[in-house]
């Protein structure tokens, strides 16, 4: 649907095509990104699974990079406002569904690696990752942007996104979003944009929303149980959480697996190989993007991913510091969950690489104008 709108956008689509023609650095970078994963299929020990990951890279990542590039090339304050509001409304809708449909009835099987929670097969991982993003966006909106201030909708969305994040039960998203949010709050303090006490009051309000939601299902007790298990990493005899124990096993054995093919790795998809069960415990991926690149694409892949993340960060930082913190949220998440082909949020920021100076200036000025348009206020 998005690409139908893009292709039928007339002059905006022409601007996008012209950018692809003129921005050779971006095009080469994108082709290199595709090639380095595709070439590794030649020597992959699990070709068919690797091929499915490659398809995922194309449909989940490449198309989203191009869509974000289209938005950046045709960027305006109006488009930015629409995107923020869509993100917030969609997050609120998902949270309300999760509260009233009761998605957090556990059917976790630590040996079969089925979904932990879900409305039927609604992954709590995808939901949690998105709600962490929504929570950060809602906080940025209150501190800097001032959208949806009528009827205090901005504050309501902050509370709902906070509740939705906790309801997801995704520990990685909760911790990562809290870390990034704390950095954003500290960063904004130097300009006295906010009142920390009032932010805390609103977050406490979010806890009340969560408690209310817990009345309808058992998600709150599950969340407490899942976080309690984190502390058992120091007392592994009491550790009963399959997700944590499997990750600890992977972290301990990954270097030995990496040494088996140091330079070019084992090929895309090769982590999922029955012959490696003693190292992987049958997981399809290690839930850590650095380990995944090191094992599947070797030192070349490891250098590549570190270079990509560095280029992205520098490119986003040219536009806006707070935006670069949003990118770091997705980077942190990639260290705890999902595979290369599902790191859509993180890799989408490749769209910022090699933007021409005119576009950088236009996007930067639009964002700055929205931030500086309203007086810097506290959330209340």
Image (spheres, rainbow, N blue to C red):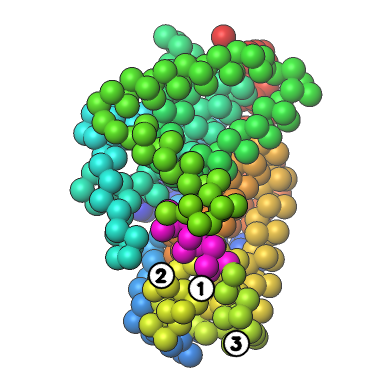
Locate the C terminus by quadrant: top right
- Between tags 3 and 2, which lies in front? 2
Between 59 and 138, the one lying in front of the other is 138
Residue at 29% from the left image edge and 33% from the top image edge: 218
Is there CB contact under 8 Å for labels 2 and 1?
no
Q: Is residue 249 magenta?
A: yes
Residue 89 visible from this viewpoint: no
Q: Is residue 36 magenta?
A: no
- Between tags 3 and 1, which lies in front? 3
Q: Earlier in the sequence, mark 2 or mark 1?
A: 1
Q: Magenta residues, as a range?
A: 241-251
Between 200 and 373, the one lying in front of the other is 200
* Location of mark 2 (residue): 283
* Location of mark 1 (residue): 34
Secondary structure under tag 2 reads loop
Secondary structure under tag 1 reads helix
Q: CA distance from mark 3 to mark 1?
A: 21 Å
The quadrant holding residue 131 is: top left
The quadrant holding residue 112 is: bottom left
* Location of mark 3 (residue): 261
Q: Earlier in the sequence, mark 3 or mark 2?
A: 3
What is the magenta segment's predominant secondary structure? helix
Residue at 66% from the left image edge and 18% from the top image edge: 196
């Amino acid at each position: 649907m998005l690409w139908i709108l893009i292709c039928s956008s007339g002059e905006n689509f022409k601007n996008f095509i012209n950018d692809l023609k003129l921005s050779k650095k971006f095009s080469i970078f994108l082709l290199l990104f595709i090639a380095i994963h595709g070439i590794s299929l030649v020597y992959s020990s699990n070709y068919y699974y690797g091929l499915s990951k490659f398809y995922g890279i194309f449909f989940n990542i490449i198309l989203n990079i191009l869509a974000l590039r289209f938005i950046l090339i045709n960027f305006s304050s109006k488009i930015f406002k629409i995107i923020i509001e869509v993100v917030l409304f969609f997050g609120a809708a998902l949270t309300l569904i999760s509260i009233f449909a009761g998605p957090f009835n556990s059917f976790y099987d630590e040996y079969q690696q089925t979904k932990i929670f879900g409305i039927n097969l609604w992954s709590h991982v995808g939901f949690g990752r998105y709600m962490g993003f929504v929570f950060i966006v809602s906080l940025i909106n209150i501190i800097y942007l001032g959208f949806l201030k009528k009827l205090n909708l901005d504050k309501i969305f902050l509370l709902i996104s906070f509740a939705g994040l906790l309801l997801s039960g995704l520990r990685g998203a909760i911790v990562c979003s809290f870390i990034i949010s704390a950095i954003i709050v500290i960063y904004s303090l130097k300009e006295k944009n906010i009142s920390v006490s009032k932010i805390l009051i609103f977050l406490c309000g979010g806890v009340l929303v969560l408690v209310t939601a817990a009345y309808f299902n058992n998600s709150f007790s599950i969340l407490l149980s899942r976080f309690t298990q984190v502390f058992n990493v120091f007392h592994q005899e009491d550790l009963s959480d399959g997700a944590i124990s499997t990750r600890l096993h992977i972290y301990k054995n990954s270097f030995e697996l990496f040494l088996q093919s140091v330079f070019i790795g084992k090929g895309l998809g090769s982590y999922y190989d029955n012959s490696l069960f003693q190292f992987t415990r049958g997981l399809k991926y290690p839930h850590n993007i650095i380990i995944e690149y090191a094992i599947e694409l070797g030192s070349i892949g490891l250098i590549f991913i570190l270079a990509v993340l560095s280029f992205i960060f520098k490119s986003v930082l040219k536009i806006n510091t707070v935006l670069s913190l949003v990118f770091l949220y997705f980077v942190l998440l990639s260290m705890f969950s999902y595979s290369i082909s599902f790191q859509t949020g993180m890799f989408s920021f490749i769209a910022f690489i090699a933007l021409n100076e005119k576009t950088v200036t236009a996007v930067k000025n639009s964002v700055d104008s929205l931030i500086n348009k309203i007086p810097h206020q506290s959330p209340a």
